[in-house]
Image (tube, helix red, strand yellow):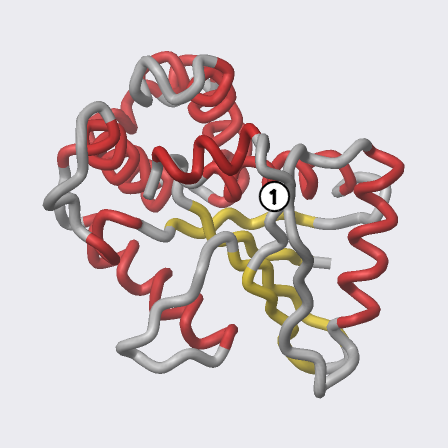
Amino acid sequence: MDVELYVDPTCAWSWTAFQWLDEVAQSRQLRIRLRPYSLVLRNGVDGLPEPLRSARLAGHRSLRILAALDDAARCAYFHALVAPFYAARMRPTLDVTPALAAIGEPAYAAAAEDERWDDAIRESMAAARDVVGTDADCEPTIPVVAFEAADRTIAFQGPLLDPAPTRRDGLVLWDMIETMGRVPGLFELSRPHGRHSLVRALAQRAG
């Protein structure tokens, strides 16, 4: 099954959702396709404090590379780029050079400064709106997970995970999401989260 995950590297929820899907993909025969979704293009950077402003801009440049890469290379690139970013509590900022070196694609570094890739990112953002059914002036909350089941596209805004689940819990979660997606009338499910969440602290720093 093909599963699309719409992400921004500076969104902590995108990172934990990716960790979850990456962990369960082999057991559930999932093919993860990462799609770029830029918080810079959605919200801009005006008024953001440092170092968040610089991190967001670096994140946007890294998404240009994600858009330029073949689907097969995107997951490895995203992991190599984002894992050190969150291990360092979003410090230092994102660095595409070692990430591209890790996957053997250093030539793609030039795409980071190529604004022509912004059109591909905007197209991906429009696709995220389409799959979750929001209007053009109402942007979805990322991450967005989308897949085909029961002859239709199923999409969720989320899940918001803190921390990323263990493999066992992750498999349970995937099976539940796939099952719930088959219920046409289900559109929202949420519960309170703890006050001392690491991801919540990172999300607040990320806006």
Q: Which of 127 and 1 is in front in this view?
A: 127
Within the image, what quadrant is residue 182 found in?
A: bottom right
Point 17% across, 50% down: residue: 44
In the image, residue 139 lies at what x, y percent?
35, 68
For the N terminus, give its image quadrant. Answer: bottom right
Total of numbered circles in the picture?
Answer: 1
Q: Nearer the viewer, residue 104 or 180?
A: 180
Point 28% across, 23% down: residue: 107
- Residue 85, placed above or below residue 168: above
Within the image, what quadrant is residue 54 found in?
A: top left
In the image, residue 29 lies at what x, y percent?
80, 48
- Residue 116, placed above or below residue 166: below
- Judged left or right of residue 114, residue 71 is right
- Specify whether residue 111 is in view: no
- Specify whether residue 148 is in view: yes
Q: Nearer the viewer, residue 136 or 193?
A: 193
- Residue 114, placed above or below residue 177: above
Query: In the displayed image of the protein, which residue is found farthest to the bottom?
Result: 185
In the image, residue 95 lies at what x, y percent?
31, 18
Q: How crowded is mark 1: few (under 14 residues within 10 Å), some or many (20 or more)?
A: many
- Judged left or right of residue 82, residue 163 is right
For the C terminus, give its image quadrant. Answer: top left
Point 83% across, 48% down: residue: 28
Query: In the displayed image of the protein, which residue is found farthest to the front?
Result: 195
Secondary structure, mark 1, is helix
- For label 1, the residue is 17
- Judged left or right of residue 186, residue 201 is left
- Judged left or right of residue 4, residue 59 is left
Point 54% across, 28% down: residue: 76
- Amino acid carrying label 1: it is Ala
